Image (spheres, rainbow, N blue to C red):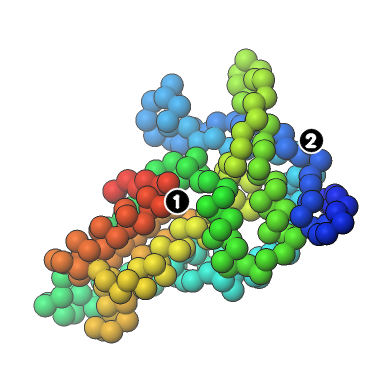
Amino acid sequence: MLYVVGLSEFNPKNQLKTPDFMENANITSIYKGRGKLNDLNNDRGIFLLSVLRTILDKLLYVDSYEDIERGMSDSNIGGRKNKNLSNHIFVANGIINEVKNDKKLCVDLELLDISKCFDSLWTDEIMNDMYDVMEPNDKLSLMYRENMVSHVAIKSPMGITERKAMNDIEMQGTVITSIKCSVQIDTLGPECLDRGEGMYKYKGCLPIPPLSLVDDVLAIGHCGSDSIKLNSIIPAYLQSPFLQYLKQ
């Protein structure tokens, strides 16, 4: 592994460190394809890291993926192997078909987009969720240590800006951030299942939790009080990881 383990009398793994140059990150913006070109809200900030940091992230991803996969539910399929949008389309089409065939059923489908999700992610909160799905080990510690401090500069047409230290940020566009985001949003599904309220029940017995693709969410509930409950659970949940959603 490409990291330096500092010596400690008690626990060497508590001293996981990365070289200073791996803490540098450059931000470049990509136009989202909608809205005014001169409005930065219509740009997506992508972080560019050093080659060695990217290799380290890839190694961490490869070594940790199986643990992460075992700990996640089927609610969020973003950033996961052998899963794609067709998984959720299959479920949604099954519900739509059931509603069409049973004239007594009525359903609400609500599409939600987490507003500027990667900008709002907080390392401490994400690592708590990663701890829940992974076996605690040195890889988990290193993931946390990587993002404790980042020296960030912005690439612009006029050149690169002065670097500023930023703490506890998750960097969109890097190797492992997508699966981290999916892990956090994936907790919404089990939360709704634990509450047991608001969700559509397929064939009257199988509750369908919110279906997510990274930071996009499809919530399905029976029309009426169930839909109202589901629509109150989701924003209440999202206040915990400091995220906000936009209705579509």
Of the residues shown, which amino acid type is indicated by label 2?
Answer: Phe
Which of the two residues, 91 or 227, is positioned nearer the viewer here? 227
Between the C-alphas of marks 1 and 2, the distance is 30 Å
Circle 2 residues within 10 Å: few <14, some 14–19, many ≥20: few
- Residue 204 shown left or right of residue 65 in the figure: left
Image height of 83 relative to 101, above or below: above
* Residue name at image x 35 percent, y 68 percent: 192
Return the residue found at the far left: 104
Q: Secondary structure at mark 1?
A: loop
| Residue that extends furthest to the top in the rendered view of this protein | 158
Q: Residue at x 29, y 48 (%)?
A: 247
Tell me the residue at 66%/51% (across/down).
Answer: 144
Q: Residue 54: x, y in percent?
A: 73, 46
Q: Position of residue 71 (x, y in %)?
A: 56, 71
**How busy is the neighbourhood of tag 1: few (under 14 within 10 Å), some, or many (20 plus)?**
some
Does the rendering let one see residue 108?
no
Query: Would residue 3 be found to the left or right of residue 142 on screen?
Result: right
**Is there a contact, CB below 8 Å, between mark 1 and mark 2?**
no
* Quarter of the figure with residue 158: top right
**Quarter of the rendering occupied by the N terminus:** bottom right
> Considering the numbered disc 2 on the image, is that residue within a helix, a strand or a loop?
helix
Q: Which residue is mark 2?
A: 21
Residue 116 appears at what percent x and percent y? Answer: 44, 41
Name the residue that disc number 1 marks. 241
Q: Nearer the viewer, mark 1 or mark 2?
A: 1
Position in image of residue 163 (x %, y %): 67, 24
Please name the amino acid that badge 1 sits on. Answer: Pro
> Going 39% across and 43% down the picture, which residue do you hit?
115
Exactly how many numbered labels are in the figure? Answer: 2
